Amino acid sequence: MFKDIAFTIYAVTDIKKARAFYEGILGLKPNEEFPGDKPDSMWIEYNIGSGSLAIGCSPDWKPSQDGAVIALETIDFDATIAKLKTAGVVFKLEPQDYPTCKMAVIKDPDQNNILIHHKK
């Protein structure tokens, strides 16, 4: 049903401090930077293998000890969503259609978020 991990996101409180860690300490090279829609918000993506790690600083998204969000890249978005709905999976975010992708967020049995993603 899935072919790859699209990306994993970690919320951060200080983008400069986070970049110093991810780029300076871990040696990751940013491949994309996205300004946020609010002051002091920004998202940065780092390609790692066939997937990406994104870090983001936004007043709407706070780091949590409850864990990160993983995005699973699906082969057939509509079929995957139909299967999940048939199985009674709880949706935190109903399917959304964006210019570059489709996505939805589901909950696992422990209430962890899993983003279902399909690049267009």
Image (cartoon, helix red, strand yellow):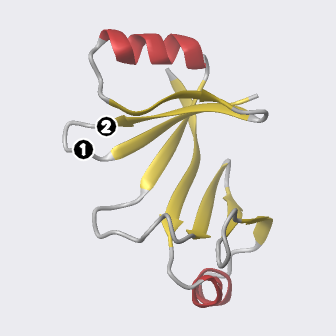
Q: Nearer the viewer, residue 112 or 96?
A: 96
Question: What residue is disc 2 on?
Answer: 107
Tell me which residue sits at (53%, 59%) in the image: 9
Question: What residue is disc 1 on?
Answer: 111
Relative to 95, residue 108 above or below: below
In the visual, does 55 lie left or right of 106? right
Tell me which residue sits at (61%, 62%) in the image: 54
Instruction: Give the amino acid type for the residue marked by disc 1 in the picture.
Output: Gln
Q: Quadrant of residue 45?
A: bottom right
In the visual, does 29 lie left or right of 55? right
Q: Which mark is residue 68?
A: none
In the visual, does 82 lie left or right of 66? right
Relative to 52, residue 88 above or below: above
State the SS at label 2. strand
Q: Residue furthest left?
A: 110
Residue 87: x and y in percent read 28, 14
Q: Quadrant of residue 39?
A: bottom right
Q: Quadrant of residue 84?
A: top left
